[in-house]
Amino acid sequence: MASCRTSCGNLTIPFPFCTSSDCNLDEAVLITCNHSYDPPKPFLNLGSVEVLDISLDGLMKVASSVASDCYDKSGSQINGTTSELTLSKFPISSTQNKFTAFGCDTHALTDGSDEWKRMSAGCVSWCDSINSTVNGTCFGIGCCQTSISKWVRDFLVDIRSFRNHTRVKSFNPCGYAFVVETEAFQFSTTHLKDLQNTKIVPVVLDWSVGNVTCLEARKNLSTYACRATHSECSDASNGIGYNCNCLTGFQGNPYLVDGCEGFMIPAVGSCWIFWRRKQKKVVKLRLNLFRRSGGLLLNNNLPTFTVEDLKMATDNYDEKNIILRQHSGISYKGILIYGSQVIIKASNVPGEWDTEVFISKLSTLSKIRHRNVVKLIGYCLETQFPVLVYEFVTIETLFDRIHNDALAFSLSCNMQKLLKCWLNYVHSTASVQIIHGNLKSQQLLHITKPCLYRKKAVNYERPRGEEFSARYFVSSVREENLISILDCRIEIDDKTEQLTEVAKLAEKCLSDSSVERPTVKEVAIALESMKEASDLFWKLPKTLSPNSCLLMELKKELEAS
């Protein structure tokens, strides 16, 4: 608008922002120009938050202070400051900022809030020599970072020291912490020696207009902010309200009546627009996949991984990183950006899956915290089928021990105690009880001391080959033909009765009806009562009969198919 002032000091102020309340849509976009400075400084609304830049893309940069913690040679604090920022409407961008701390004896905490709750985040930075730090890296050695949550509109940064910098005084007398624009600040070893001259850092806010969605805003054209003819509206992704944008092929200010103007598109520009549209389609497709997989309904603290994160971790799903192929999917060994080894399981489930069931199972896995259970680290729902990320384990599994022809294996009380201790945990001790679930020998880790197993996992998928094998087993038990399908390494002797008892328990667990299947607690009790089964042991006989190896041959055929 012609009557609105468009600058303050070195800042250009685009509409809808203005220095006068007469031409503002709402008070949240009012800029106060303080002429007591030379040149004048712009501040957000009537507060003390200095504005550094405003973009029509819905981003605003403001100034924020740096928290510091300095000590003298004796370990006495000589200087300590906090960093604080309080905003009226616009939230801190969760995608454009990081909570960052510098120091070799530093732990920092930021405490913030949205309209409903308080939120805290923190990190620890440590090093014993300046030579151990690397410029441009921020993974806990001299520098640490963590993400900012959505909707946060204020924060307070506090910084502390473990040993008052007494062991690193010569090269790092102070620790520093602040929320900062990700692209604006890179770690350098020189920061460890002196960052005291840096008082202000930029923080990016997500700004929007109004306090309703686009759908609601269009109902009242007198207050609708997207005034340009060739403009469109999009709901705010962080905070309340909406933003306006010029349509493809137009540029300018969509908040002004004639703000979006057409422009000639050269060949390079055409390619860029084509690429941009394609990128938007990819983003939209990923969002739809995320929604279809129930991502919006999940309520846990598990981190989500992007498609790019997983491609980088697995070298674009290179064949050399495959550690297990199954009908239900492929498991890859991966290395995350900060160096941790993980197992990335890419599912390949034909047809549509039940979203509610998937969410329930994912929620169950995320809540299990036990030394015996492989930890679920996170997930990705941007792909055609869900991808789960587990911690990487190298301990030998029960499946490995059973199928190792060179090693005699005793199915003794150790194995029973392993099963019983795990079954009791998931039924009674875990924060979320599991009444029915599949337990696979591939994910059951074998260690000599029962109930002290480092890790093991519950698997919820059942490959089609295993379904066929399970039905074949059930039919053999019912037809009293169990002996002919047993693994050829089992020495039967006079243990037919005990074998039959174990087989009948397994048959109940394979029932198609969940009502007929025993609970995990009932299975644990049954195993405890089978004391005689502990006398069974596995070993390779001198001669193998064709009938006794029938099941082994069947398994090999299934694995080859």
Image: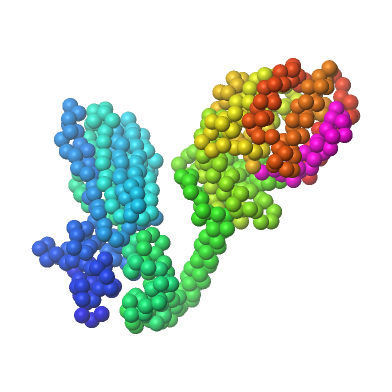
Magenta stretch encompasses residue 317 = no
Residue 155 at what x, y percent from top left?
28, 49
Q: Quick check: 109 above or below 215? A: above
Nearest the eye: 454 or 246 = 454
Left or right of 541 on screen, residue 509: left
The range drawn in magenta is: 461-485
Q: How is the image coloured?
A: rainbow
Q: Quadrant of residue 542?
A: top right
Q: Residue at x 26, y 36 (%)?
A: 160
Residue 432 at what x, y percent from top left?
54, 38
Residue 346 at what x, y percent from top left?
61, 48
Residue 183 at what x, y percent from top left?
35, 54
Q: Quadrant of residue 293?
A: bottom right
Furthest residue to the front? 515
Q: Quadrant of residue 433?
A: top right
Dominant SS type (magenta): helix
